[in-house]
Image (cartoon, rainbow, N blue to C red):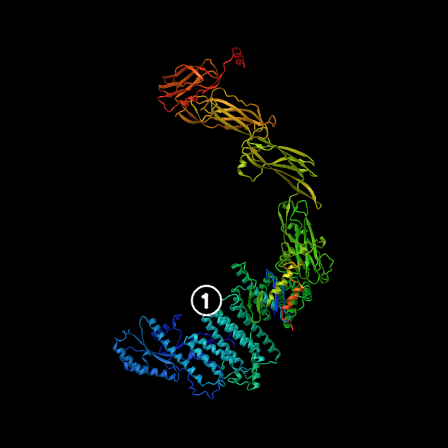
Amino acid sequence: MAVCIAVIAKENYPLYIRSVPTQNELKFHYTVHTSLDVVEEKISAVGKAMADQRELYLGLLYPTEDYKVYGYVTNSKMFRKLHNSFTDVMCNPFYNPGDTIQSKAFDGMVSVMMVQAS
Amino acid sequence: MMSPTQWDLPPELCCRPMAFVALTGLDVTYNAIHRAIWDAFCANRRADRVPISFKVLPGDHEYPKCRTKRTSYEWYIPKGILKTGWMNKHLNLVPALVVLFYELDWDDPVWKEKQSECATKVEIVRTSLQGRNTKVAVVLIQKKTPLPPGEDLVASERAASLCNACDLSGKSLFVLPHTDHLVGYIIRLENAFYEHAQTYYYTEIRRVKSHKEFLNKTTHQLLFVRHQFKIAFFSELKQDTQNALKYYRTAYSLVHELRTHETNMLEIKTMAGFTNYKICRLCFQHNTPLDAIAQFRKHIDLCKKKIGSAELAFEHTAWMSKQFQSFGDLFDEAIKLGLTAIQTQNPGFYYQQAAYYAQERKQQAAHMCAHEPVGSYPTPDPLETLSGALDFYGQRAWRQGHQSIDPPDAEKEKVGIQALQVKEKDVPHSELIIALLSNAVAQFKKYKCPRMKSHLMVQMGEEYYHAKDYTKALKLLDYVMCDYRTERWWSLLTSILGTALRCSYLMAHVKDYITYSMELIGRASTLWEDQKSRIEKNLIKVLMNEVPEAEPDCDPASAKAAQALWSDRVSLAGSNRFTIEVQDYVPFVQCKARFLSPSFHLDDPVQLHLYLKADCPHPVRFSKLCVSLSNQEYNQFCVVEESCKSQDILEPLSQENMCLVPGKTRKYSFKFVAKTEDVGKKIEITAVDLMLGTDNGRCVLLNWRGGGGDAASSHEAIQAARSFRSRGRVPEQHAQWDTVSIQASTMIISRVPKISVQLSHKPPALSNEMYCICVSIQSNEKTVAKDVKLTAGLKPGQDANLTQSTQVTLNGLEVCDESHPALLPDIAIGDLQPGEKVEKSLYVCCVTTGPRIFLFHVAYTMTTQAEGTDITCKCHKDETVTIETVVPFDVAMKFVSTKFEHLERVYVDVPFLLMTDILSASPWPLHLVSSQLLLAPTMVALDEPQSQVEHVVLQTGECASECFSLQCPPVLNGTSSVASGQYLISWKRKSSCADAPVVTTVVTLSHVMVETIPLYVHAELPSFGRVRESLPVRYHIQNRTGLVQDVEMSVEPSDAFMFSGLKQVRLRILPGAEHEMLYNFYPLMAGYQNLPLLNISLLRFPTVSGQLLRRFLPSRIFVKPQGRQAEDASIAAA
């Protein structure tokens, strides 16, 4: 189960970020932000080699001592659910691409995927 | 450098173990030869030399005593895993080999005495090494170069004798001739030493291994670890790193099999750490970095939870931190030796984790050493030992060698822990953390992790903040803040700003305090409203020159000190005016300025709107707003100023003009009339300044460069442009902030002219004619248009050749020449009253054909009013027209014979005709005034040539022809090309007025070939014949040569004629003479009839054929039918 889920715009700012409320939110934000280094590197490396067959799943971005950060995780269909929900958000005619996501449905989906705070 | 701490790994663990060989008998201080030998051993120990550490020891040096060998382990209970002195002992104290250097030549005169002295020295060394397996070797330093082995019988005999005396094997006796090749000998020697050392370590390994059979698993668990570690260490000394790694791995797993309890946890972790270090080091050395990483991960996983005593939890984190740090060091060292690391696996992560544990340690230390009644350091010092050091690694000083589960003395234990806690309080934690973080920063910088680097720098900044070094903290935070701002990670930016605000508060840095506050209450801040409210209130206090409230979470003592600093600032006069460039921040007031139009006419006032919006929780009152423009003279028109009292700042009235209500857009309009000299120039907004506070309190100028905007506004503008909301209709008065775009510059353009310029002309222009363009200018102004000037002619900027081939004049009565310009500038027209109209005719002469653009530029000045002031405007209107120039007519000419046959060439003194055709190409009727033929001297007219086309009018496509009879005088060389002359045609447009100038077009006639012929024949005959009536024909034959010519003539019979005369004759013609032949032809048939052919051949000129000569003669004649006599007369009359 996830402790933090973030959707990042292509300009690298967060469209959506939520973490389990019990822990230091800021720490997760920093973790997500620093993992963008790896995303950027991976995307630029792939971009050079084979732009067409770009694999959406970036895999394990980097291991921290306590958590594993994945980019576009597919295991347990977790990401597919998130992606579908994100697609729904994008399809909303009232959503302006690039704005932060404020959607109850998306919130709900993310909540299901997160570790439930006991 | 910090002094080594308890947690640093001992240097003997971290070094590369090398075989230890002691050299004795060398006097390196006083004996130059010995010194040279020693230097040869020490100097240049590169990688290609055997790994030995040499030491010079005196001959009677006392080596560490060897304990009596244990015969049974039955009653032996080990007190610890590894003695602290053990590694050092085998690295530096117990040699693998002792070498005795002795000066002795084979032929020494006192050989016997020397031999026994040497034997004594060997014996002394042997005694000192009692019980050890250390080998002894002897090196004889000799002055003479030895003979090849076997040749020197004395040498071999004496060597054997010496070995016997010293109880040495032959392999342990060496000879070192002190000659030129010292280094070579030394290298051979040390290789031999190395072999001895290896044998020694091998036996040591065997010795330790042999203990194993005596051990039992219940009481000797510690020894299992110890022995494996020792075997591994000896293997390293033996340079057998593969086996060393194997034994260290065994030792490592044995460490974790030990029974753990609180009292031995530290010892186990220490040994695990040592062994792990050795394993990782060897893995990197073997170039298997993944093994090293895997081992380290395993190590951390196994040890992470082994915290040990809860009261000393900080010890565990300190140890963890050290584990990560030393692994990072190993990793980094391996990279320096050529290993490649990657972004996601580099030493930085280990340093970062080390820093993380160091931070944990600091927190635990603060926690444990604060709430416990730690008190003062206990006496006597429980950490003091007799030797000053511990016997075993990782044990407690107050209960060394104790291995049972419970501490022997609870009181001693308590005091010991207290001592450790007191000591921990003095550890410079922040310093440690910052050092580790900066190590990590250096690594992440190298491996392209800018965000990780920033994150670590934030942590460093925060650590400096905790260490109360606010200046350094701010420096770091300021450095990374803009990265987070440009990446729009507002939550992180807010957190950093919070720390920065606290720093600036604690230092009472007013400007920084204002800068950070202003961003924290702005739209980029993710703070809650109540927090923002608190900060804004503090900001207002600062503006009022009061002391702000302390930031929460500040250390109370520091906050108190800060209050004092602030009070000093308040009392300090001056330096109360701050300008803050807000462009690169996200301040709480947003600003956008726009000119209403990208250009303004001079007579329209320039309009500028300035929009302000506050994002803070409470309304703010400002005292001045001014816009700076590139022409500073206009600045005075773009100011809003209203001084305010303190009360206004504290409780601004929201309806007031100078008050910004949160979330509401406020618009300020400015208007000014541009200066005449700014026409054609750009006016730019260079800055917008918003003054907060008062002149007598503190005063802060928020300064935006250009037309406003800040670090976040460009992205917001893009989003707004994409948004569906922007497409909706918005009432003008509620202009939505997002829809306002910045327009920071405008152009001043001249006033729109109210004048009409009309052109009338008849295109196309004919080349060389004086083409008339009529310009009519009419003023539609309401006042007098003064000083009207017309500039007319070829528009500049076209092909340069056009300037040469175009002339313009106002005088249409004479044809232009090249002295006339292509453009007539500033033709004065005078003043034009409202409605007045003026006409001007312009004559253009275009020499070449093709299109040309003509410009008619009318400029004038007039006075008008804008915003109640008179302004003088310069207006101008441009009209352009493209005019095509065409040729008026085409002239064709040809030479024909008198028989109107086309002539390739003409003959000397033979008449011919020149025919000219003038074909009109003009769409307008042309009046040909006259034409003239100017003949070249090589041609003469047979009669006075007169123009045959005078006053002919040619319509489009019509053709006028003329014909001239000419003859060429004799030429030199028989044949040559001669000029014909020129043909002049004078013409004008039919439509032009009578006094319009006549244009003369000159056509150069083509050259023609002239040929001299030797014989000329021409016939004289009536214009027609009549059937059955005599037709006399006279042929004249001229000899045009200087010679007598024999001519043969014959007339061929013809069906149409009978004739009389000489049918065939041969005659002679004298030079220049002419012969006449008369024939009487008698036509037999009517109609065009071919005359009987006259064949002439010149005997001297066979080339001159009858055919050529026949061209001069008529070939046929019209024969009329025989008529009645009466009709004859009527025909003749007709």
B504 or B1027, which lies in front? B1027
| Residue B216 seen in this snapshot | yes
Q: Quadrant of the C terminus of chain B?
A: top right
Point out residue B172 in the picture as x, y percentages from the top left corner: 33, 79
The residue shown at (45%, 71%) is B285
In the rendered view, would you say B138 is above or below A28?
below
Q: Secondary structure at mark 1?
A: loop
The residue shown at (53%, 25%) is B961
Query: Picture quarter containing residue B488?
Result: bottom right
In the rendered view, would you say B917 is above or below B559?
above
Q: Is residue B689 left or right of residue B1023?
A: right
Point out residue A64 in the picture as x, y percentages from the top left corner: 56, 70
| Residue B108 seen in this snapshot | no
Residue occupied by mark 1:
B338
Query: Picture quarter containing residue B353?
Result: bottom right
Query: Picture quarter containing residue B736?
Result: bottom right
The amino acid type, in three-letter code, at marker 1 is Gly
Q: Is residue B121 left or right of residue B834?
A: left
Point out residue B183 in the picture as x, y percentages from the top left corner: 34, 71
Q: Which chain is disc 1 placed on? A: B
Q: Residue furthest bottom?
A: B75
B208 or B1104, which lies in front? B1104
Total number of numbered labels?
A: 1
